């Protein structure tokens, strides 16, 4: 639908559209309104799953791909524009309220056990952008932004993410050393069992080492992981006090679902791609080492996360300036669509492996099989 790599010389062409990200925390109020109007509880319980896997995927293909990049002339102005940071801060607050409202709905007894589980799994998908916000703000130079990143991640119990992502993933991406880079032929479920504990342990080691260099113990107040986990603890205590044990269990389910959703995103981002060994060293990370998706609608929802190659080349570029770059392999759908594919590994392999082999020109030395030195 959109022309290839149009440069816009005066404005961000999506400036008025980025508030589409506000629609994600609005899902829970929408579900509450549906229940109030008498909608069947089972239909409301599956609404978050339908909206992401069904509606978002359909809208991606209706609107199509968008390869437009902002021009170099306006990049610095966009980086300094407070509009974008304020939007991320606002979305974070709305997600916090959404979590509390969801726990209140479940505590009211409107859903049966299975319906509560389906609702919680769907809300994990819907609230996963909190990690994307933490990811965006965690790369920022501003201390205020990094603190907000800890709040965003703390709301869903993922406070260790920024530490490992910055000090581990960006260093070892697309190599067997990186737990967040999926290997060729590795199913989503096997990857998640390796990635989730690997990222957690890597973060704890990195933060322990950082504090040790400053002469501080792990349990010091300057431990950024503990600061974020304090937010998680306060959130859990508030839910328990206000809504009871069942709501607390539901909150834990949402957090677990968010963790798995981020595993899906990580699985997608570098599946099967490897930085080769050249003269005994890993080649630099380049656009061909990350999967991109240029679908317009999901890039609005996920704040350009799908322009992943440019992020790995320029980690501190804010989301509004990330470019759609040449040389990056392209996913067949936005993240909602490929998430649905990877849940069925044979279907995922059937779709992605031909694209992968074409992207690497059939050179199997460019495959991350987990066996490279």
Image: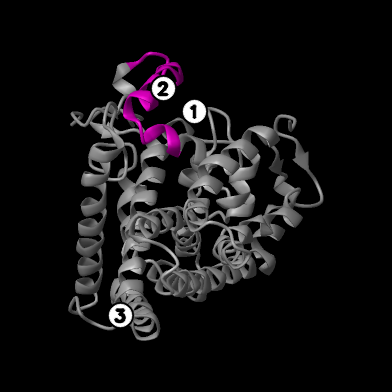
Q: Which residue is drawn at the image coordinates 52% and 45% (left, top)?
A: 50
At which x and y percent is residue 108?
44, 74
Pick the quarter of the image with the C terminus: top left
Most common SS among magenta residues: helix
**Quick one: SS at disc 2?**
helix
Q: Which residue is drawn at the image coordinates 54% and 73% (left, top)?
A: 93
Task: Say if 224 sits above or below 354 in the image.
Answer: below
Query: How far separated are the C-alphas under marks 3 and 1?
Result: 40 Å
Q: Is residue 83 magenta?
A: no
Task: Say if 201 sits above or below 151 in the image.
Answer: above
Q: Earlier in the sequence, mark 3 or mark 1?
A: 3
Q: Are marks 3 and 1 in contact (CB under 8 Å)?
A: no
Q: Nearer the viewer, mark 3 or mark 1?
A: 1
Q: Which residue is mark 2?
A: 356
At which x and y percent is residue 244?
33, 80
Name the mark on residue 222: 3
Pick the quarter of the image with the N terminus: top right
Q: Which residue is mark 1?
A: 329
- Per the rendered image, the range of residues in magenta is 339-363
């Amino acid at each position: 639908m959109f022309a290839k790599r149009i440069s816009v010389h005066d404005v961000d062409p999506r400036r008025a559209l980025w508030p589409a990200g506000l629609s994600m925390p609005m899902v829970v109020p929408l579900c509450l309104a549906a229940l109030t109007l008498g909608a069947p509880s089972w239909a409301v319980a599956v609404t978050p799953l339908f909206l992401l896997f069904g509606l978002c995927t359909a809208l991606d293909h209706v609107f199509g791909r968008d390869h437009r990049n902002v021009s170099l002339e306006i990049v610095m102005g966009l980086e300094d524009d407070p509009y974008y940071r304020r939007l991320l801060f606002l979305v974070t607050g709305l997600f916090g309220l959404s979590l509390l409202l969801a726990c209140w709905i479940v505590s009211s007894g409107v859903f049966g056990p299975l319906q509560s589980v389906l609702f919680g799994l769907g809300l994990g998908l819907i609230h996963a952008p909190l990690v994307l916000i933490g990811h965006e703000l965690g790369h920022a130079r501003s201390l205020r932004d990094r603190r907000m990143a800890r709040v965003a991640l703390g709301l869903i119990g993922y406070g260790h993410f920024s530490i490992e992502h910055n000090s581990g993933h960006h260093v070892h991406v697309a190599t067997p050393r990186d737990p967040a880079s999926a290997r060729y032929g590795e199913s989503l479920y096997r990857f998640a069992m390796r990635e989730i504990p690997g990222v957690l342990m890597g973060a704890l080691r990195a933060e322990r080492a950082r504090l040790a260099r400053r002469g501080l113990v792990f349990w010091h107040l300057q431990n950024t992981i503990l600061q974020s986990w304090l937010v998680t603890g306060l959130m859990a205590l508030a839910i328990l006090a206000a809504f009871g044990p069942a709501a607390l269990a539901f909150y834990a389910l949402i957090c677990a679902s968010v963790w798995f959703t981020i595993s899906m995103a990580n699985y997608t981002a570098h599946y099967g791609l490897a930085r080769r060994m050249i003269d005994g060293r890993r080649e630099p990370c380049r656009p061909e080492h990350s999967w991109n998706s240029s679908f317009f609608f999901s890039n609005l929802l996920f704040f350009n996360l799908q322009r992943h190659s440019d992020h790995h080349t320029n980690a501190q570029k804010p989301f509004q300036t990330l470019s759609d770059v040449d040389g990056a392999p392209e996913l067949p759908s936005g993240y909602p669509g490929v998430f649905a594919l990877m849940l069925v590994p044979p279907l995922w392999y059937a779709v992605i492996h031909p694209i992968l082999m074409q992207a690497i020109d059939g050179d199997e030395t460019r495959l991350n099989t987990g066996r490279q030195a």
